[in-house]
Image: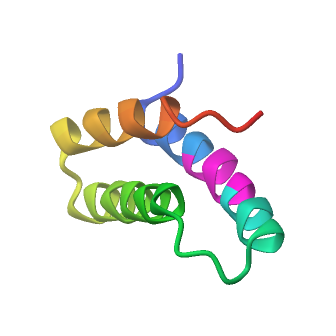
Amino acid sequence: MESILEVLCAEQLRVEEALGYYKALWPNSSCGGIKIIEDSLQDAGQAISEGDLEAMKTAYKNLHNIKTN
């Protein structure tokens, strides 16, 4: 069974990859969706660096809800 840290890191990678595609398609966009994705990734990174289990769970849920395909 994977830990919350492992699944959160996997979600981060998935969403970071999608964010790269979005930015490539719309490089000068001030799209609110891109900002939300960036904020969610930042929250996940902060949760990991602080070792906050509840924040990691919330970050995972937020990243998991971001559709990438």
- 13 magenta-colored: yes
Residue 34, position as x, y percentages in the image: 53, 62
Q: Residue at x 71, y 71 (%)?
A: 23
Please state if 42 lies on the left or on the right of 63 as rendered. left
Q: Residue at x 45, y 61 (%)?
A: 32
Residue 66, position as x, y percentages in the image: 54, 37
Q: Quadrant of the C terminus?
A: top right
Tally the numbered discs.
0
Secondary structure, magenta segment, majority class: helix
Q: Is residue 12 above or below residue 19?
A: above
Res 46 quadrant in image: bottom left
Residue 13, position as x, y percentages in the image: 65, 52
Residue 27, position as x, y percentages in the image: 73, 80
Q: Residue at x 50, y 55 (%)?
A: 33
Per the rendered image, the range of residues in magenta is 12-18
Is 2 or 56 nearer to us in this picture? Answer: 56
**Extreme-bottom residue of the structure:** 28
Is 12 or 24 nearer to us in this picture? Answer: 24
Q: How is the image coloured?
A: rainbow
